[in-house]
Image (cartoon, rainbow, N blue to C red):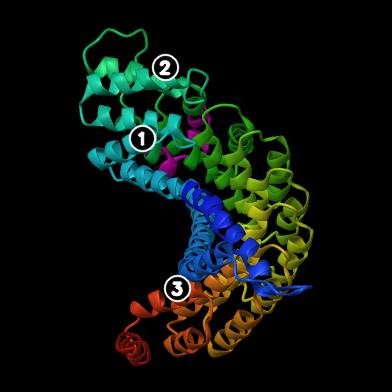
Amino acid sequence: MTMCTRSLVPSIAGLLTAVLLAQPRAAAGQTADGPEPPHPAWDAGWALARDLRVPLERLTADLQQMHEQLQAQQREAEAQTRNLERDAERAARGWEGQYEAARQAIERAQWALAAQQFTALAQARVPRADAAMYWRAYALDKMNRHTDALTAVGDLFKSFPTSRWVSDARALELQVRQRSGQAVPVDAGDDELKLLAIQGLQQTAPDRAVPLLVKVINDEGSLRLKERALFVLAQSGAPEARATLEKVARGSGNPELQIKAVQYIAMSGQPERLTVLNGLYASAVDLEVKRQVLRAFAMAGDRQRVLTTAMTEKTPELRAEAVHQLGILGAREELWQLYQKEPAVDVKRSILTALARTGGSPRLVEVATTDRNAELRAVAVRQLGMAGGKSTADTLVSLYGKESHVAVRRAIVEALAFQGNADVLVSLARKETNPELRRELVRRLAFMHSPAALEYLTEILNK
């Protein structure tokens, strides 16, 4: 209750007390000895009651309206909080795509674009901000902005002194200083020439290239050069090449090189690769490496390993990743089993999204109908809305009639609007008695280019 509402209550209470005190005596109008003569105070009380009746009714109506407004504001605040949480979750997922786009700019030698994108990621302090700082310095060096590149490297050392990117950043710093004419203790050589030499050996003498490639990976040098050497090693069936690949995948060196090694192992087609990946998942401490191993299991079609991880993993982010991969694999029944056992609401949301991807509409209907958590019922409703189809629309209308929670009913309206079901929304709006929901229905109809919506909006204006 607001200060304004609280200040009105004592005044109204006093007025009501005056009326109630006057009313019983005046209503009696007589005593045991006969009629009692009118008393001036009673007449004044009745007059006061008559004078105050209309204002009191108005004040009561105003209080009721204020109460409804406060409830609506509270619901709106709760909805905004949920939206902010979802936006934060989407942002956490979105930076990965931005990072990959910036890395592609590096591969395409689009140095200015890469520097701009990695600068934004570093300033946003995303989970891989240290990696973004490294690649920003790399791109600046390629643009011959050596002073800026050294400053960027210095920012990495200052902001992330224990980062796994520090070793590569020191190698880059030496190369930048060398190219800018400064005396350095290490001759880093020409990366472009080494890349050409690697490509030549790959084509003409791959077995002879293996020891040299292993040396490139183990020595100080450019990360881009090491990535290329690792790629060439992944194409070789030599025991030394496979051993080096697994060593990098298990190692504590550069995290991006480690992830590349995991991906190359998954794509190798070697019979023992799943055993190797399973060992990597068990020993890895980096969340991103574990996530890549889960994707590798899915790439290999190993549904059981992904399911086992989803059932036993203690980290919610990794359970959510396993759920996502199960959705890609079409593991509908496995997902439903997980949903019934999963304690975390965030992971349950991921399961509902994955179920929708597998065409599990009946399970979504079950959640929307029976789940005790209103937020999860709303998620299921939205996923049903994206599924489309007349049967889905009929189900949503049926759910709307049974659902009591306003937030879930709003989600049903949103789902129907997503499907473009103007006729259904008009029908619901005509029957709806809740002012808030009716306004939501009309708001949705206002954005729909439909004859039914136009006719209903015109009808409202003509009243």
Residue 202 belongs to magenta span: yes
Name the residue carrying label 2. Answer: 158
> Which region of the structure is painted magenta?
200-214
Residue 138: x and y, percent?
A: 32, 29
| Residue type indicated by callout 1 | Leu
Badge 2 or badge 1: first in the primary sequence: 2
Q: Give the alpha-carbon distance from disc 2 to disc 1, as whole Å.
A: 31 Å
Q: Amino acid at mark 3?
A: Glu
Q: Which residue is mark 3?
A: 440
The label shown at residue 269 is none
Which residue position is annotated with label 1? 195
Q: Main secondary structure of the magenta part?
A: helix
Q: Secondary structure at mark 1?
A: helix
Q: Dot 1, crowdedness within 10 Å: few (<14), some or many (≥20)?
A: some
- Compared to residue 219, the image places residue 87 above or below, namely below
Q: In the rendered view, would you say 305 is above or below 435? A: above
Using the image as rendered, state which of residue 342 and residue 456 is in the foreground. 456
Residue situated in front as seen by the camera: 199 or 260:
260
Residue 121 visible in the picture: yes
Q: Residue at x 69, y 41 (%)?
A: 281
Whether label 3 touches label 2, CB < 8 Å: no
The residue under label 2 is which amino acid type?
Lys
Q: Quote the CA–CA distance across marks 1 and 3.
A: 61 Å
Q: Secondary structure at mark 3?
A: helix
Quarter assignment of residue 133 = top left
